[in-house]
Amino acid sequence: MMPWGLEVDQWAATKFWGVLCAAALILGAVAIYSGATAFCSGGAGAAAIKQSGAAGCFEYWLNRYQTLLTGLAALAAAWLASVPVRRQLTEMARQTAASSRPALLEISQSYEEEAERIGAAAGLDYAIRSVVSLYDDRHDWPNTYTMWEEKCWDTIRDLKSLNEFLTAISNRHPEYSELNSRRNEATEALSQLIHAMEELGRAFRLQTTGPDYEEGEDDITAEEDASIRANMTPARIRWDGARAALRESLTTEIREAWRMLRQTEQFATGPHKHFHD
């Protein structure tokens, strides 16, 4: 999830509360005036006015609450003085939001590119299954020898390219996050799968063209061959799970990134205007 947000209707909310407060003050003033007038017209009110020496009802109440009225007047003056400042701050926030849009757009597009690469990796599953299936069909090795090695090492090359792509992204985001945690798991699963594929390629070569004795290679045993073949299954299962989890996290981040981008645009330009991508 992205760490910050913008209130789209901040200025509209400020105006709403301003109107509401003004209405409350007017109603309060009317109520106070009505009560004061009723008090002054009564016997107790007239006696109190006479005792205070005030010239009338208005002067009586003015003298009684002079300090309070002075404070309210100062508060109102401060509020009026803050209006231009608040407008300026709102405009600055809008400009900041507008300037942050390119960065948010770049983040959204980088997530989409990564998700596209992960989605395209599904095509590698067919190549891996084909390589393993042909490896298991030992009776057909003489017919598939040249094609098998080419297919195997092409698949390994594509897996390494994807792993380098994900590792580069992970290195640019060393901080912990659920997305980066799943990305790291995907790179580790890819490394395990690549190693298993390379071992399978080595085992195939040793059993077809034979070992290079001058380089210290020995004939592969049946037990070693079985172990190398067995390692492919957990490696493929781990990669399938890691890839699915990473794609799920990327889908969530893409949705959140575009939501933040649209909020930023609305805050910067108003609720009825949009940028064009």
Image (tube, rainbow, N blue to C red):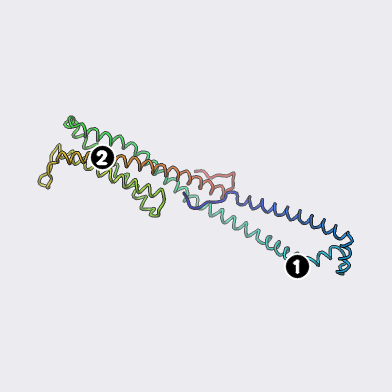
Circle nearer the N terminus (1, 2): 1
Residue 173 position (above or below residue 154) = below
The kind of secondary structure element at disc 1 is helix
Q: Looking at the picture, how far across and down is residue 192, in whole percent?
A: 28, 45
- Categorize mark 1 by other alpha carbons within 10 Å: few (<14), some (14-19), many (20+): few
Residue 234 position (above or below residue 27) = above
Q: Pointer 2: what residue?
A: 232
Q: Which residue reaches farthest left?
A: 214
| In the displayed structure image, the side of residue 111 where residue 72 appears, left or right | right
The three-letter amino acid code for the residue at tag 2 is Met
User: Looking at this view, is 5 or 104 the one in front?
Assistant: 5
Q: Pointer 1: what residue?
A: 67
The three-letter amino acid code for the residue at tag 1 is Thr
**How far apart are the alpha carbons under marks 1 and 2?**
86 Å
Q: Looking at the picture, how far across and down is residue 72, in whole percent?
A: 73, 63
The kind of secondary structure element at disc 2 is helix
